[in-house]
Image (tube, rainbow, N blue to C red):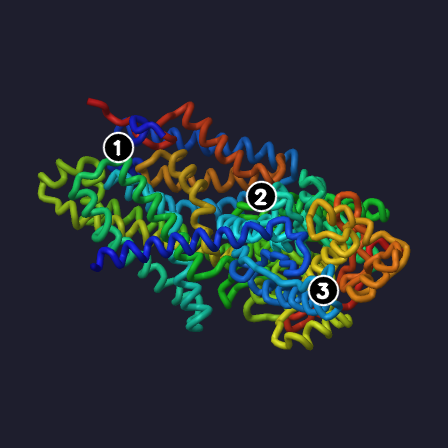
Amino acid sequence: MSLSSQTKVLALGAKEAPSKRGKAARKRIIVVTAVVIVVLIAGALTRGTTPMLQSVVDGLRLGLVLALIGVGLSLIFSTTGIFNFAQGEFATLGAGVALALNASVGMPVIPAIGIAVVVGALFGIVSEKLLWKPLRARKVDTISTLVVAIGLGIALRNLFLALMGGSSRSYTEFAVQDPLNFGGVSVTPKALASIVVSLVALGLLALFLKRTRAGQAIRAVADDPTLASATGIATGRQLILVWAIGSALAALGGTLLGLVEQVRWDMGNQVLLLVMAGVTVGGLGTVLGAVIGSVLIGIVTQASTLWIPAELKYVTALAVLVLILLLRPQGLFGRRERIG
Amino acid sequence: MTKHTRQFTIVALAGALALSGCAVDPQTGGDTEGDGVTFGWLLPQTGPIASLGAPQIAALELAKKDINDAGGILNQQLDLSGGDEAGDPAVAGQAVDRLLAEGVPVIIGAGSSSISLSVIDKITGSGTMQCSGMNTTPELTDYPDDGRYFRTVPSDVLQGAVLAQRIADDGGKNVAIISRSDSYATGIADSTEQAITDLGLNVTTRVDYAPDSSNLDTEVREVVASGPDAIVMFSFDEGAKILQGFLQAGAGPNDVKLYGTDALPIASLAEAVDPQNPAVLEGMTFTQASSGEGSSFSDRLLEESSDLKTTAFTPYFYDCAILSALAMEKAGSTAPDDFIKEMIPLTNGSEECNSFADCKEKIAAGDDVQYVGAAGPLLLSEAGEPTTGLYDVLVMKNDGTTETVDTVREPQS
């Protein structure tokens, strides 16, 4: 992870930079989509259309959950410079809170998920106030902060192990569902709900960042914190907001993962590598990139099993990561960092 | 004044420590007559398999009672000294260090295969014998232990054959296998696949998944798409997630026959799959190393300690203790180098005997005995593990508990 290849800009695509950058981004979307479609057609021809479509749907579901977790990672990185290695645990926190409310208190799953997301947001705010802000105030360097994030992740993970035990558990509702069938492609209602909820949440985030004052302020801070505070933006407030949004989205991703699969103390850490791959492929610091990169990684892992043994599916995802970074070190939608 | 008192205390403590150190040392080797023999044990009192520890310790206490009631080993009373394996190689290692310092000739344990693998070099390297009644990994078969590691529970290779036979008996023809990619599951999956093919059944697919895989959708679909009428899974607790996948893909226990092993958390499996429907896995079949439930041994054990929740693996640990004691009787020595070589012959002799008292008498009379104890015949191989094993076949009922429908000896003779 070379620092010069990372970008600290929140590019949302075409709108804010209608000139060269917008066009280039649109062109890259077309290229990526074309490559994916060619691969998928090849898959459909060699392995049959239904299995191919099935793996695309499975991959989309997984990829969107990765995106929910990853967008937070990306937002936090672009505004604070912290690469939050504990992001996976923020997701587990959401899933765990929902499980506790659901299995122990007996609350229905859907309101439990709502509360879990709120708890996630609060946890993000608390972590900013008690940890990240004091670290910033003391001018602790990036590497040390990174180590703090890794430590926080390990500590939380072991806390979850102590509280939840080592076994996997399901929510009391929707554990086993009859799938819906769309021309041979089967999707459980909960997987479909997971796709829809993810898309809505990501859509709302995009609208928030583009249309609201607070969102624009966040983007300004991401672009240049010094300049932003000079123009009268209260940087500290925006950072609290970023942590709240980032960890709430991660908590939502965790609950969706727990709903479709199972809840486990290390579930967030298990997907963290894929989340990081998705965010990096898309270009660190861009929301659009995080979403497209994550979906790409999701589909690649699922579709690769049509050709290669299932044991190796994450290898393919990481091979894609390496390949894309060799061709475009800043990721698909990242901007090359200005030096000097 | 205070200063002097403190100095005195330190000196006194140091002296006491030194003395206690001296007191332990002369017992090493332990073939002096008269003052007793101590067996060490390393069992799970805490940790992920802690629920199995208490019954296993009770089984060893019962063995101690049986041995001492029959006059002890070489006229010495047997005593036990224990340590907690705790599911943690570091804690287990400390317990082993303490037991070795006490100079025990044999350490019975550990429960978990991976803990055994973490301490086996330390134990066998010090010349002490190790015997486990619960380690089933094939990895321990050819482990370089200088012939000092034994187990009374058979390797999982035998269980694969039982599983395959059960599938054939149930009328399965096209079998799909899904297996965690680790040393336990790969070993037993290989032997099951071989046994299934040998029985003339068709293996439709075999999917090995990475143990740290979070998402298993495609693996599940691949298994179901191969069109099996029976599915065998070798999983730990991620098995619940896989089973949810099977149910949602139309391959539940009502559609195909599902099989698993004792590595799955069988008792809590139905709840993990669907907390609201305990009947979700009704009809799923499991094999497990026989816990001797309902045998005269388990009756006797439960009579001694009525609060035990399970008897899993207890006969094997009991046999470890009895067999070690008999080997000492036969060798006329409690030094490991002398009695270890008697272990294998004692399970392969021509004159059958069933209890410590019975066998001891026959050994004294010069008979070539075969110890057939709580777990039945052992017939230890040169590698120090049973060549025969007793397996329970369990079927899940509609309340999420299981019923033992059959007990099978493998290989059938």
The label nearer to you, 3 versus 2, is 3
In the image, is A231 to the left or to the right of A316? left
- The residue where tag 2 is placed is B122
Label 2 residue SS: helix
> In the image shown, does A256 or B5 lie closer to the viewer?
B5
Label 1 residue SS: loop
How many C-alpha atoms fall within 10 Å of the one at disc 2: few (<14), some, or many (≥20)? some
What amino acid is found at the position of numbered circle 1 in the picture? Pro
What label sits on residue B72 in the rendered view? 3
Residue B291 position, x and y percent, is 71, 64
> In the image shown, does B181 or B410 lie closer to the viewer?
B410
- The residue where tag 1 is placed is A18
The span from disc 3 to disc 2 (Cα, nearest Å) is 28 Å
The label nearer to you, 2 versus 1, is 2
The C terminus of chain B appears in which quarter of the rendering? bottom right
Please report contact status of discs 3 and 2: CB closer than 8 Å, yes or no.
no
The span from disc 1 to disc 3 (Cα, nearest Å) is 92 Å
In the image, is A24 to the left or to the right of B333? left
Labels 3, 2: one chain:
yes
